[in-house]
Image (spheres, grey):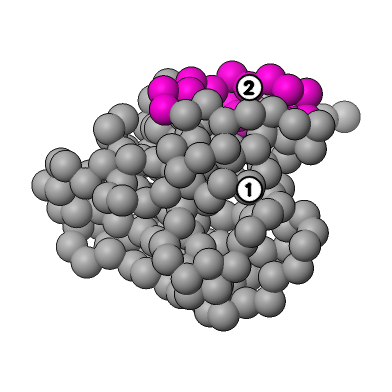
Amino acid sequence: MISLSALILLAIPLRAAAASAVCPIDEDFTTGRTAAARPRDPGEFTPEGWRVRSFESQLKYDLGRHYRKGLVEIEIRGPLKHMPKHSLFSAWNEEAASDGARKTQGFYQLRLINEGMMLRLTYRPGGRSFEGEVAPLEWEDKWYRIEGTWDTAGGDSTLKRDGVLLKTGKIHSPFEGFRWIFIGTDNYQDFRAIPGMVYRRLKVCVSD
């Protein structure tokens, strides 16, 4: 017979696991709906998903507070072979998501660049950014699953394509984490969304 104290000890890690990760963003854009704000060009919904209509197309989410650890998954299709920098997904510690507050800003971007991809990790007070590039890559006319993780508490951050790990990097100095999420484009420098790109799904899970 299992004692009450043993049952309590067994229950503690189960409760911790259940509470450790939540997924505040879980979007199926084929439904023609989104919970995001659309402060710039709103893009458009098609039967395939949310379609980038112009350089300014943007979906913006507020997680409600900062999170030090996160997992992102997007399903995307379109003109992915690009030389200039484009951000497919970004997470920011500041709502402005721009290059203005360089003393305090932190961000995580999954980028297209040089016909490949890049993992960009930045926390300005923590010193030098991490820019991990894998280029060029082969791109086909098909759906791709882009995945990433962030860890602003000192662990690894990652970038994957269709389950294959492309890059791993670290943010040099721990900080409070990210709160604001952007797809299409954020407001950083002169980055632009890519007209014709279609996002089918977006999922963001967070903890800590």
Q: Tell me the amino acid under the disc marked 2.
A: Thr
Q: Name the residue under label 1.
A: 197
Query: Quadrant of residue 138 in the image?
Result: bottom right
Q: Tell me the amino acid under the disc marked 1.
A: Met
| Nearer the observer, 153 or 166 | 166
Q: Residues within 10 Å of mark 2 (few under 14, many from 20)?
A: some
Q: Where is residue 200 in the image (x, y as percent from the top left)?
A: 73, 40
Look at the image and tell me in which quarter the N terminus lies: top right
Mark closest to the chain's N terminus, 1 or 2: 2
Q: Which residue is drawn at 39% across and 32% down?
A: 179
Up-down: is 135 above or below 2? below
Q: Is residue 180 visible?
A: yes
Q: Position of residue 70 (x, y in %)?
A: 52, 44
> In the image, 129: left or right of 42?
left
Q: Position of residue 71 (x, y in %)?
A: 57, 46
Q: Residue furthest left?
A: 103
> In the image, 3: left or right of 17?
right
Q: Which numbered dot is residue 34?
A: 2
Q: Is residue 69 visible?
A: no
Q: Give the range drawn in magenta.
A: 22-40
Q: Where is residue 18 in the image (x, y as percent from the top left)?
A: 66, 30
> In the image, 42: left or right of 76?
left
Q: What element carries label 2?
A: loop
Q: Residues within 10 Å of mark 1 (few under 14, many from 20)?
A: many
> In the image, 2: left or right of 38?
right
